[in-house]
Image (tube, rainbow, N blue to C red):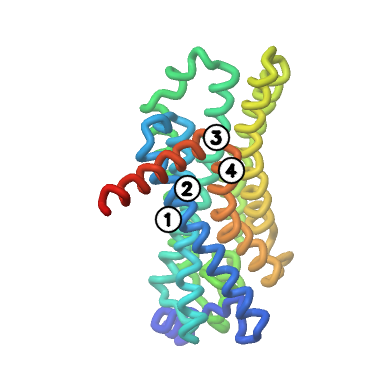
Amino acid sequence: MACENQTFNSGFILLGIFSNSPTHIFFFSLVLGIFTVAFTGNVVMVLLIYLDNQLHTSMYFLLSQLSLMDLMLICTTVPKMAFNYLSGKKSISLAGCGVQIFLYVSLLGAECFLLAAMAYDRYVAICHPLRYSVLMSQKICGLMAGSSWILGSLDGTVEVAVALSFSYCRAWDIPHFFCDVPALLTLSCTNTLLFEKMIFICCVIMLLFPVAVIIASYVRVIVAVIHMASEEGRRKAFATCSSHLIVVGMYYGAAMFIYMRPTSDRSPTQDKMVSVFYTILTPMLNPLIYSLRNKEVARAFMKLSRKGKSGKQIAR
């Protein structure tokens, strides 16, 4: 009980991924640069879609939700990691750890379902274009996005409640740069086998079910695109869908690697490196992939830029 009480009073220690060596200082600066690009890119995507009337469609609404989730995800982990590294303090309170787990797990789960909704949106747009306004109405689109947030939050609530109910009687040093559930479980002196099985079942629901929806949607899309008579139509359809598939591949591949392996097969170093990929790199790449490969987003950005320049000239 003494160990358990000390854990609840003092919280945990995040060991992080950087030391004070010149190489690690360079990589830390690189992470801060990536964070800045990711933060700026996702904020710009959300604002563009909100401000440009021509982007007020189901596809771009779902894309704005993805950018919002990526923005929240990167802000959940990187600022705390940067503060700990710069201040030399590595502690995180029990409440702070719980908040990180809840936000992190909730956002990961929400993105899983949202990516499936985006795949379904592309399926309807390409395979049933005449019924698109009915099958992907504002009400249905809002319901899909809202369901993604709710399902993700339910998963986050369950995991944080169970994870923080365990006794932690070993060292309180978490071998990670944020409170990740698999890393936290290695410190518990409670038998976590049942919880690990629950996490695996949640992963089947949160990862494999959306993947099945995505695969089914894109099989139909590919068949429809192949039979298109217009070369321009095929090119545009493939360009739109390929952006989404790139994001799906990066996101689901890393998430499955982290959460669908038993604890005995885990390596702290591997987990940290893969976590960096999909909690820091992916939120940066998503807006770049969608903006660079999307003429409508580029048009909206140029339009907003011209308005900004005109406003400055008038002010002068």
Alpha carbon distance from label 2 to label 4: 15 Å
Please state which of the two labelled residues, at mark 4 or mark 1, is closer to the viewer.
Answer: 4
The answer to whether the residues at label 2 and label 4 have Cβ atoms under 8 Å apart is: no
Within 10 Å of disc 4 (Cα), the crowding (few <14, some 14-19, many 20+) is few
The location of residue 55, given as percent across then percent down, is 42, 33
The location of residue 119, given as percent across then percent down, is 57, 32
For the residue pair 60 and 33, the one nearer the viewer reads as 33
The location of residue 209, given as percent across then percent down, is 60, 38
- Label 4, on which residue? 292
Badge 4 amino acid? Leu
Q: Is residue 266 visible?
A: yes
Please state which of the two labelled residues, at mark 3 or mark 1, is closer to the viewer.
Answer: 3
- Label 2, on which residue? 67
Q: Most extreme residue toward the left, as rendered?
A: 315
Query: Element under label 1?
Result: helix
Badge 3 amino acid? Lys
Query: Element under label 2?
Result: helix
Residue 140 in the figure: left or right of residue 23: left
- Label 3, on which residue? 295
Alpha carbon distance from label 2 to label 3: 18 Å
Please state which of the two labelled residues, at mark 2 or mark 3, is closer to the viewer.
Answer: 3
Within 10 Å of disc 1 (Cα), the crowding (few <14, some 14-19, many 20+) is some
Residue 148 in the figure: left or right of residue 229: left
